Image (tube, rainbow, N blue to C red):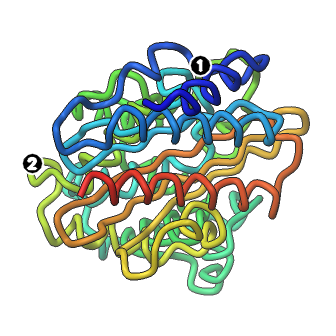
Amino acid sequence: MTIWKFGILAALLAAGGCAAPASDLQSQSTDASAPSTSAIAAATARIIDIEKRSGGRLGIALVDPEGRVLLSHRGEERFAMCSTFKTLLAARVLTGVNGLQLDNRLTIDPAAVEGYAPFTRSRLGEGWMTVGQAAEHIVTVSDNVAANLLLDQVGGPRGLTQWIRTLGDDVTRLDRREPELNENAAGDPRDTSAPKAFGETYRKVLNDDTILGAPKREQLAQWLGDSVTGLNRLRAGLPDGWQVGDKTGFCAEPGAVEVNDIAVFDPDGSGWYTLVFMLDRPRETGAFVDELGAEVGAIAAELVRLQS
């Protein structure tokens, strides 16, 4: 690493509560095809600067299709998942848990329709939606009522967490349903994950034939690609021509806001990378966070290009 890069990194690490734990800076892949140590250090310095500007606590993990962590910042710290758990719920549904089929019908109880549920409200006249429609719309528009209907089919939050454990993830946990899971109380481990663990679990459901067969993985990837809630965030920093999708999350409790985005991308058809962005208690939301996310997406893209 050049002297000037060491200097920038040291200065940024010395700046108050936004310093990355030493383990994060030392945990990157040493594989020959991975970006160089100097490139990772420079990228980490940029992430620390983004965190400082955000006013909050930023968790980042970039995981390649083979499971190598290319970049991590606060990668082992817990963050609220908010709605980003819904991708894993959709994946669980696609496994056919308890004989569940995508054309099965789910009855809508009008009395239970509250909060953010745009697709569910569009189905009130029919009084039902299919399992496949529910799974699609928890990813594409983050419908909360559809998510609760699907949780009922997989054993609730506990059932989903138990399945996540079978994927080798002993960190990610779902404890509550929508909207209670968005509380994001300081120090509460409920409904949380950590960037590295979450990125690896997303990677597995999109790349591992033993979890989902190719057609179902392609279906999940299509839903992520059709998602409309994060177009201006991580995806805005990724190159045109890459296959890209994402799932956002937003915990809106006053004083406990969190803005998340989990992007998946395949630059050349060789497999899915995952990029985790979890920003706890930023000083602003909206376009401000979207622009920070786009910067993170661009940093990740540079590292991936260096790997190839």
Please give the label number shown on residue 27.
none
Q: Residue at x 52, y 53 (%)?
A: 299
Q: Nearer the viewer, residue 26 or 273?
A: 26
User: Residue 88: x and y, percent?
Assistant: 39, 49
**CA gap, disc 1 to disc 2?**
29 Å
Picture quadrant of residue 34? top left
Q: Is residue 79 toward the left or the right of residue 195 in the image?
A: right
Give the residue type that dot 1 points to.
Answer: Pro
Please give the label number shown on residue 189.
1
Q: Nearer the viewer, residue 262 or 178?
A: 262
User: Residue 101: x and y, percent?
Assistant: 25, 67
Q: Residue at x 62, y 43 (%)?
A: 82
Residue at the far bottom in the pictured view: 125
Q: Earlier in the sequence, mark 1 or mark 2?
A: 1
> Residue 249, relative to residue 137: is it above or below?
above
Please give the label number shown on residue 210.
2
User: Residue 3: x and y, percent?
Assistant: 53, 27
Local crowd at mark 2 within 10 Å, few (<14), some, or many (≥20)? few
Q: Is residue 230 toward the left or the right of residue 196 in the image?
A: right
Local crowd at mark 1 within 10 Å, few (<14), some, or many (≥20)? some
Q: Nearer the viewer, residue 102 or 223?
A: 223
The secondary element bearing badge 2 is classed as loop
Task: Assign the N terminus to one quadrant of the image.
Answer: top left
Task: Assign the C terminus to one quadrant of the image.
Answer: bottom left
Q: Nearer the viewer, residue 247 or 173?
A: 247
Q: Residue at x 23, y 34 (%)?
A: 167
Q: Is residue 254 toward the left or the right of residue 71 in the image?
A: right
> Residue 189, relative to residue 118: is it above or below?
above
Give the residue type that dot 2 points to.
Answer: Thr
The secondary element bearing badge 1 is classed as loop
Picture quadrant of residue 150? bottom left
